[in-house]
Each structure stands twice: as structure tokens, then as C-alpha cells.
Image (cartoon, rainbow, N blue to C red):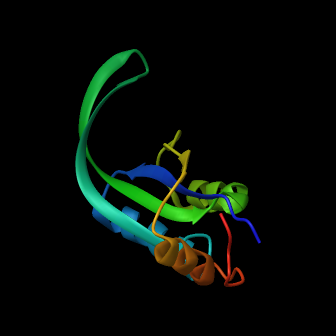
């Protein structure tokens, strides 16, 4: 079985919101792991430059689950337009990638 693993980046406005999104994604096997980090973002919104403290979610997943993951994030997120960006993993530790697959309920013995 070949999988298309990736990292999906999402920002949240608070640590509590980030944790709620992360837990839901892992519980629903839409993510194997979600790493949370405090960040500062500078961005344009409605014609104005803004600066805000946010939380970055780095979501490790199979990109075949992206649409369901995106739907779940939108359901739980407080932003009108949340960041939901997928980046393909092109290489990684075979043991770690296998663990991602197992955590997502995929069969072991994944090939890349």
C-alpha cells in the first residue's frame, strides 16, 4: 500500500482552540500526531496589516484524509478563513512513517 503522507498547517487563535482541534483530529484518526507551537503572525486582513499571537498546528496525516480533516477543522475553528495548508512529505524515517500509517488505521508494511 502506498500512502501520501503530509503535514497540514493550521493556525488557531488560542492554545485551548488548538488543543481542541488537535485532540479531535487524533481521536477521529484524521491525524497521527499534532504538534502545537506558539507563534506570532503578521498578515493582511480586510485591507489592514495585523499582528497576532497564535498557535501553529503541524498535523501529520495521510493526505487522502485531507478533505475530511479540512471539514473537521472548519467545524471546530473560530476564524472566518482558517489557514489549512497541506505539504507533502517527500522523505522521512521509515519507522516514523510506518507509525503514522498505523496510527491512522492504515495497514502496516507501507511502501514509499
Position above or below: 35 against 43: below
- Residue 54 percent coordinates (x, y): 29, 49
- Residue 47 percent coordinates (x, y): 40, 15
The number of discs equals 0
Residue at the spot 62% in from the left edge and 76% down from the top edge: 101
Residue 34 located left or right of residue 112: left
Position above or below: 81 against 75: above
- Residue 50 percent coordinates (x, y): 28, 27
State whether residue 68 appears in this view: no
Residue at the spot 34% in from the left edge and 27% down from the top edge: 43
Residue 8 located left or right of residue 41: right
Residue 72 located left or right of residue 87: right
Q: Which of the 4 quarters of the picture holds residue 73?
A: bottom right
Residue at the spot 45% in from the left edge and 51% down from the top edge: 10
Residue in front for this viewpoint, 31 or 52: 31
- Which quarter of the rendering shows the C terminus? bottom right
Q: Residue most toward the top?
A: 47
- Which quarter of the rendering shows the N terminus? bottom right
Residue in front for this viewpoint, 32 or 22: 32
Residue 69 located left or right of residue 49: right
Amino acid at each position: 500500500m502506498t500512502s501520501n503522507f503530509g503535514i497540514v498547517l493550521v493556525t488557531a487563535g488560542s492554545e485551548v482552540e488548538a488543543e481542541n482541534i488537535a485532540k479531535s483530529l487524533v481521536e477521529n484518526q484524521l491525524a497521527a500526531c499534532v504538534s502545537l507551537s506558539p507563534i506570532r503572525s503578521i498578515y493582511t486582513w480586510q485591507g489592514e496589516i495585523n499582528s497576532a499571537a497564535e498557535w501553529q498546528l503541524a498535523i501529520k496525516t495521510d493526505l487522502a484524509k485531507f478533505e475530511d480533516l479540512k471539514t473537521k477543522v472548519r467545524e471546530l475553528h473560530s476564524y472566518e478563513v482558517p489557514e489549512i495548508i497541506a505539504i507533502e512529505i517527500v522523505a522521512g524515517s521509515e519507522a516514523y512513517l510506518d507509525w503514522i500509517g498505523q496510527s491512522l488505521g492504515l495497514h502496516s508494511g507501507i511502501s514509499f
